[in-house]
């Protein structure tokens, strides 16, 4: 496949500890530029923490231009299962790659719940991304009801096994980021106890190594109400490689503080 911007990229070329801003459907071009200008002015080059911005689609070219050649990477919040063609309204992973995207969020709970994305569809998106050289950030996590029924592990196991089934079959997985995001923690201000998060992260680690052997280029992030106030507790864990941040990533100062805390913890 002819992909214009760069070849495959793996986590040996970028850092293991990620601080990912999921801007969701927020920010105008002007707000995005202001955010990035402050970020560049205030951030020293981090040795451990990789900052990644995931803007909404229409902001991608602008964020691509402003971050080119800097220490900040960017990714999309979703993409199509096909690289190009007659898919009106879709978001081409080939175009994202050619604009300089490094990563794509896939299977975010808002996509699963509000837009009916299935494990099968997500598996196809993971496959096209790895084929094109975009690192998938596969989001997994249980709802509150599933949590109460103690089904967290089963749900996460299913979402990972199903989401990765095509890359496993075709042996195309080079680098992977998993974001464990309990649905009930997203935007709620509540997080599970550190113990619970660590148990699930350990479980994910073991599951991935049983599926792929000891794949080196894996990061396992936590997401769901990450804030300045809880970043140290979470970032100090050996089992948490970084964060996927929604609400707190919209404010540049709080995003910066969280990234700095992660940097200091690793
Ligand atoms: P939150 O969102 O940090 O606002 O909880 C996280 C996410 O949806 O990825």
Image (spheres, rainbow, N blue to C red):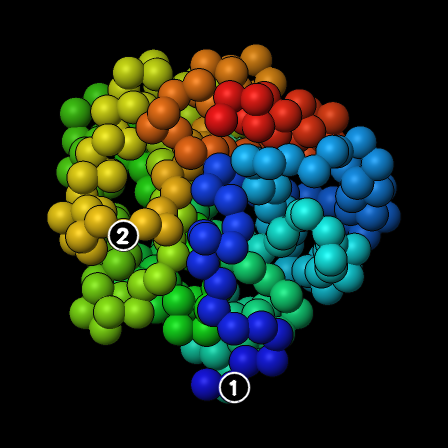
Residue 85 appears in the figure: yes
Residue found at x 61% / y 74%: 5
Residue 89 appears in the figure: no
Between the residue at mark 2 and the residue at mark 1, the CA separation in whole angstroms equals 26 Å
Q: Is residue 209 left or right of residue 90?
A: left
Element assignment for label 2: loop
- Quarter-of-image position of residue 185: top left
Q: Residues within 10 Å of mark 1 (few under 14, many from 20)?
A: few
Residue 261: assigned label: none
Element assignment for label 1: loop
Q: Is residue 174 above or below residue 131?
A: above
Residue highlighted by disc 1: 2
Residue found at x 51% / y 21%: 265
Q: Are marks 2 and 1 in contact (CB under 8 Å)?
A: no
Q: Residues within 10 Å of mark 2 (few under 14, many from 20)?
A: some
Locate residue 46, reporting x and y percent: 64, 35
Q: Nearer the viewer, mark 2 or mark 1?
A: 2
Q: Is residue 62 above or below residue 192?
A: below
Determine if the C-beta at disc 2 is less than 8 A from ligand 1. Answer: no
Nearer the observer, 126 or 49: 49
Q: Earlier in the sequence, mark 2 or mark 1?
A: 1
Residue 215: assigned label: 2
Locate residue 221, reporting x and y percent: 42, 36
Residue found at x 75% / y 33%: 43
Locate residue 32, reporting x and y percent: 78, 46
Q: Is residue 252 above or below residue 75?
A: above
Q: Is residue 74 left or right of residue 207?
A: right
Residue found at x 60% / y 80%: 4
Determine if the C-beta at disc 1 is less than 8 A from ligand 1. Answer: no
Locate residue 141, reporting x and y percent: 32, 37
Q: Is residue 197 left or right of residue 102?
A: left
């Amino acid at each position: 496949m002819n992909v214009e911007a760069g070849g495959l990229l793996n986590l040996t070329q970028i850092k293991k500890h990620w601080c990912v801003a999921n801007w969701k459907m927020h920010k105008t071009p002007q707000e995005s530029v202001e955010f990035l200008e402050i970020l560049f002015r205030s951030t020293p080059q981090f040795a451990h923490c990789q900052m990644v911005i995931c803007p909404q689609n229409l902001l991608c070219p602008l964020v691509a231009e402003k971050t080119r050649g800097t220490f900040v990477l960017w990714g999309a919040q979703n993409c199509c299962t096909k690289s190009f063609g007659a898919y009106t309204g879709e978001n081409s992973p080939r175009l994202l790659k050619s604009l300089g995207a490094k990563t794509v969020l896939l299977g975010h709970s808002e996509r699963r719940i509000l837009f009916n994305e299935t494990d099968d569809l997500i598996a196809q998106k993971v496959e096209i991304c790895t084929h094109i050289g975009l690192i998938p950030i596969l989001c997994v996590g249980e709802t509150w009801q599933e949590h109460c029924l103690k089904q967290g592990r089963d749900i996460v196991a299913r979402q990972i096994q199903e989401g990765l089934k095509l890359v496993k079959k075709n042996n195309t997985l080079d680098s992977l980021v998993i974001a464990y995001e309990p649905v009930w923690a997203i935007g709620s201000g509540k997080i599970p106890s550190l113990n619970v998060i660590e148990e699930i992260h350990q479980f994910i680690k073991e599951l991935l190594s049983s599926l792929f052997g000891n794949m080196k280029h894996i990061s396992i992030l936590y997401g769901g109400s990450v804030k300045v106030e809880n970043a140290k507790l979470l970032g100090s864990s050996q089992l948490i490689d970084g964060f996927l941040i929604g609400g707190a990533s919209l404010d540049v100062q709080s995003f910066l503080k969280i990234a700095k805390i992660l940097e200091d913890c690793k």
